[in-house]
Amino acid sequence: MACWDDRAQRVRMHVAEVGEPGLWDRVVVHFTQLEMHGPLAPVIGAAS
């Protein structure tokens, strides 16, 4: 489920954890690091 957070000016996600313990925490950390460091550069010549 997603909703707009007026205070943060971004979408806030609410997810029920159904996998292994700590999985959602690792997903959040991963995407937080991506936001902090910017998008990854595309690999030139990579197979689609």
Image (spheres, rainbow, N blue to C red):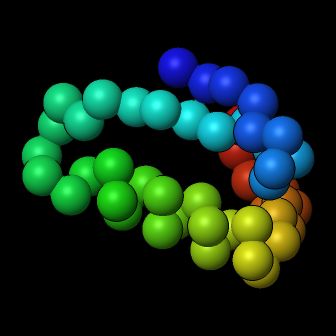
Which residue occupies 77% across, 79% down?
A: 37
Q: Position of residue 1 (x, y in %)?
A: 53, 20
The residue sitting at 26% across, 52% down in the picture is 23
Q: Left or right: where does residue 44 sit relative to residue 19?
A: right
Residue 17 lies, with reference to residue 40, above or below; the image says above
Q: Find residue 5 and report its image quarter.
A: top right
Residue 17 visible in image: yes
Q: Residue at x 21, y 58 (%)?
A: 22
In the picture, which quadrant includes the C terminus? top right
Q: Place residue 43 in its image quadrant.
A: bottom right
Q: Is residue 32 above or below residue 16?
A: below
Vertically, is 24 above or below 43?
Answer: above
- Residue 48 horizontal side relative to residue 21, left or right: right
The extreme front residue here reads: 7
The residue sitting at the left extreme is 20
Residue 44 drawn at (x, y percent): 86, 62
**Residue located farthest toward the bottom when viewing the structure as drawn:** 37
Vertical arrangement, residue 36 with respect to residue 31, above or below: below
Could one spot residue 40 in this view of the protein?
no
Q: Is residue 27 left or right of residue 21?
A: right
Residue 26 x/y as whole percent: 36, 62
Residue drawn at the location 17% of the way across and 37% of the way down: 19
Q: How many marks?
A: 0
